[in-house]
Structure formats: C-alpha cells, structure tokens
Amino acid sequence: MCGIIGYNGKKNAIPIVINGLKNLEYRGYDSSGIAYFFKEKIKIIKEKGRISELEKNLDNDMPTLAIGHTRWATHGKPSKVNSHPHMVGEVCLVHNGIIENYLSLKEELIKKGYEFKSETDTEVACALIDSLYKKNRNKIEVLEQIQTLLKGSYALLIMFLDDKETIYALRFGSPLIVATSEIGNFIASDIPAILEYTRKYYLLEEGEIAVISKDKVNFQLQGKEVNKKLLTFEHDISSAKKDGYSHFMLKEIYEQPKVIQNFLDYYLNNIDLIPDISNYEKFILLLVVVLIMLR
Ligand code: GLU
C-alpha cells in the first residue's frame, strides 16, 4: 500500500507534498515522486528508495499545485522508471492499487500506437485516459467512462496538461480523503498527510469524481454535482501517528478495542451515514486472532 497526496492552494506545494508523503511513510514504499506544472509543461521528479533520495533531486521551483506518491511495487520492480507519477500524452497521474485487466487494455492501446516506458499497470491507466481524452474533451465524462473500463482497485490523482488549475481524483477499493483549509485544498490516501494543516475533510466515495481547485472542492457523480458532509477529525493528532509505540503494527494491534468502540460510537451518532445494506444477500464476519509471543 502506497501513499498519495495532492495540494492545490496559495503556498509552495513542494514542501507540503513532501511533508505529506513523509507522514504516510508508515504505509510502506520503495520509491517516491512528485509532479507539478512548470513553464507550460508538467515536471516529474521521481526516485527509487527513501523520500530523502527524492529530496536530493528536487529543484527550487515554487508551484502552488502538485501531486505526490510513494510506491509499493506490484507491477514491475522498484525502479525510477516504474515510479509514479506517470505521464502519457496530455495526462499525468499517480495511482494506488492494482489494475487487474491492464494486460488486455495494454494490448488494445499498443494497437492504437501507444508505447510504454514502464512495466506498470498504472501507465496503462494513464494511456487509457489519454486515449479517451483525445476523443472527448470533457474531462468529467472521460473520468466517468474510465471507471467502467478499469477492473481492480485504484485511487487516482490526475493532472491534465491543458488545465493548470485543477487536480482530479477518483477511487475504487483504495481510500482517498479530500481536505479543505485556509491555505488550500488537499487530497490524500490518509488523514496523517493533512493533519498539520487542517482537520476538515470529506470521504471520497466510490464512483465520485473530486475536482480540486485552489479555492473550492467539488464532487461529481454520474454527471451531477453531489453535496457531501464535511467531517472533522476529532481525535488527538497522536492517534494518527505512532503515539509512543515502536511500530504502527503494534499500535494497530493494541488499539483494536478502542477502534471498535470509536466505530460503533461514530455510527450510533451519525445514523444517516450507515450504508444501505438491505440489498446484500449474506455477510461474512472474519475474526482474526493475533497471538503475541512475549519473551
Ligand atoms: N500497481 C501500481 C504499481 O505497481 C501501484 C502500486 C502502489 O499502490 O503503490 O506501480
């Protein structure tokens, strides 16, 4: 599982995105990268290894919009060329997840003349969006369409070369939150990435497309704008960090009773947010027992 963060606001986006990626390091990764607009082009800087390797190669640019990524390789080895962001034609993106049907999509795209530099499923998704965008200049319609074509899991942050003002995002299976603040708007795979700037966030639901501008965020679902509930992260910041434990895994194990209590409290206080489960035929309850051997 990798980390994703995008920022669009008033400040220099590079330190904000790098800081956000560092706050997502606990998710594990093997490489990292960042993309931003620079002189009518999109500049991509990426490196294999720790975020500190990426930092060594950063330029002194001051963009106010950027997307960043830490990769946990699933398709292709950890390497600079396989790292995200990827760019094909007019589309640049970062991806968390696995595109299961990428081989058949890749074959079709090769027939259309696309060439691939990396071994990733992500570059295929990027080329697919580019190919659709070449035929239909309506970005929202293209992003609606892509959701019917991609199989698997994805959280995608997307920049279009002809739109310097906006980050687009969508997800299936992999999580994304959209956060708002005085200094601009964020999109990230998890809360710790944005907590230094804001506690106000939206949960992006599957099927929705987030349109993140400097001064507003907007959500589209099946061609219509959706009004979503702005949530507040009420917990202590330390609860999103290691909080004294030496590893996140230990913290997760010891926090299980608290998490279940918080989960129940949250839904009992927000009955309207409980998903409609009346159409499900059966539920499978998995009980995982972890034994810790103490010496
Ligand atoms: N499947 C993509 C890759 O291998 C994304 C992996 C991730 O979630 O970091 O590049």
Image (cartoon, rainbow, N blue to C red):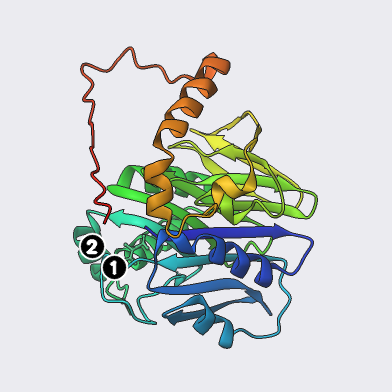
Label 2, label 1: how many angstroms apart (C-alpha)?
7 Å
* Disc sitting over residue 112 in the figure: 1
As drawn, 219 above or below 89: above
Res. 228 image quadrant: top right
Residue indicated by mark 2 = 108
Residue type marked 1: Lys
Q: Is residue 8 left or right of residue 253?
A: right
Q: Secondary structure under badge 2?
A: helix
Q: State the image coordinates of residue 258 (x, y, percent, origin top left).
A: 47, 32
Q: Are marks 2 and 1 in contact (CB under 8 Å)?
A: yes
Q: Position of residue 99 (x, y in %)?
A: 28, 55
Q: Position of residue 230 (x, y in %)?
A: 66, 32
Q: Which mark is residue 232?
A: none
Residue displayed at 45% across by 82% down: 47
Q: Nearer the viewer, residue 105 or 280?
A: 280
Q: Position of residue 39 (x, y in %)?
A: 69, 80
